[in-house]
Amino acid sequence: MNKDPTALSRILRISVPAVISTLSGNLMMFLDRVFLSRYSLEDFSVAMPGGMLSFTVATLFIGIGWYVPSLVAQYYGADRPKDAARAVWQGIYFSFAAGVILLIASPFAVKLLATEGRPHATIVLAQNYFYLTMGANIVSMVTVCIGGFFNGRGETRIPMAANIAANVLNAVLAYICINGLFGIPLHGVTGAGVATLIASAANLLFHAAFFFNRHYRTMAYTTQAMQFDGAMMKKLLYFGFPSALQNFIDIGGWGIFIMFIEQTGRNAMAAASIAFNIEMIAFMPVMGLASGVGIIAGQEMGAKRPDNVWRVTRKGIAVALGFNAVLAALFIVVPGLFIMPFNNPNDSSFAAVQALALPLIRIVAAWVLFNAVLMTLMSVLRSAGDTFFIMVATSVSAPLFLVLPAYFIILKFRLGLEMTFWLIVAYIILLFFVILVRFLQGKWRFMQVIESEYS
């Protein structure tokens, strides 16, 4: 390790590949939505609710795997590589069991897309996309655990390379399948789902090829630590389940929020989808940076150096704020620039969609700065083991201050999309202050995720 574990160069060395990885995923998703918008606004509009529901249902299980890099980071910081590998395998075994549960639950969950007043053809499209993306999510659960091994060790370039390769494959397949090229009998959102499923399987193979490489089998015990370990599984569930539940409630709240918007009409849903996809340009890179900061925080907690966590958090926040400040300025000054890729010259209603989307993108600029700090702080607290508080904060705030007000603003009083997006600003600012106060209290300094000696 560097002499100064909190050096900006180390933060960037670990975080930049994570940022590039999430950017590639964001670009893939962005292109996917662009291809769909140019194919059909109907297909474009159903992709978000179908995909969001699939991801929300799967998140309760994927979220367990998302805690694997935090465990690996702490064991790596404590110089216990075999325990780090053991944590990864428990995540893989959990993913196998969770995949079976999701396959059983999917036919029941998909019925939520059959909302009243929705055309039958639209429901079928959304449900097909749900099943395909659910398959991709099940595959990705294992990928998340294996990727967590490399991320927790700070070797973020390996998942970056695998993710870029998979995302390039996804983009190429999406273009072919959405447009039904080369005689492929798939079109629109169904083709997009097939492309996502194939690329997810390829991504798992890419990660596995590195994980079972001779170097890691020898130096990091990736095959020697593959036995089931009840104590380690208990630890993963103890810290991972609150984190998973937090993500489930958070994403579920956003899913309900989007379903409310969908009931106001196709143009409103298309405009909101454009704004949310553009917001991903700010969200995904900062999420990558936050994960990098969280990795270093976990390693420093494992090495019993909590003072370094404060230093690395400060530096990470500064970088995140700088990045999002530039994007926020662009969202305000040239919002039309970001809408241009979604333009469908063959759809006469796009002008109305664009008129709705322009002010929404400017409102997005109001929350991306707060979100940059919020994501960084939450990543650090999660790596330190403070997952229960984050779960409680989200469990209370999402239903009371996002979903419930959204119902009245969107459906009851019909106050419009702009007021709806200002609600998001208020919600993120509220959650930002709650998490900031928790971090400043410093209780995370005394939390113990890994035991002093593993037997």
Image (cartoon, grey):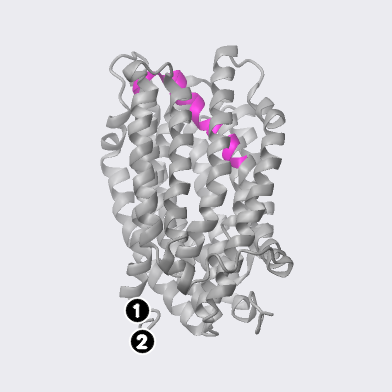
Amino acid type at image mark 1: Ala
Label count reads 2
Q: Is the residue 17 above or below the residue 263 in the image?
A: below
Q: Nearer the viewer, residue 203 or 137?
A: 203
Q: Residue at x 65, y 21 (%)?
A: 114
Q: Quadrant of residue 271?
A: top left
Give the Cα distance between marks 1 and 2.
8 Å
Q: Nearer the viewer, residue 112 or 233?
A: 233
Which of the two discs, 1 and 2, sits closer to the camera? 2
Asked if one can make out residue 25 in the rendered structure from this viewpoint, the answer is: yes
Circle 2 residue = 3
Q: Residue at x 52, y 53 (%)?
A: 144
- Residue 204 at x, y = what percent? 48, 48
Task: Give, as a single range, the part of the protein colored magenta.
Answer: 38-56
Residue 48 part of the magenta segment = yes
Q: Quadrant of the N terminus?
A: bottom left
Q: Is the residue 407 above or below the residue 305 in the image?
A: above
Neighbor class of circle 2 (other Cα within 10 Å; few <14, some 14-19, many 20+) is few
Neighbor class of circle 1 (other Cα within 10 Å; few <14, some 14-19, many 20+) is some
Circle 1 residue = 7
Asked if one can make out residue 268 in the rendered structure from this viewpoint, the answer is: no
Left or right of 454? Residue 164 is left
The reply to whether callout 1 and callout 2 are in contact (CB within 8 Å) is yes
Majority SS type along the magenta span: helix
- Residue 125 at x, y = what percent? 54, 20
Left or right of 203? Residue 233 is right
Q: Residue at x 48, y 41 (%)?
A: 201
Amino acid type at image mark 2: Lys
Q: Quadrant of the C terminus?
A: bottom right
Residue 137 part of the magenta segment = no
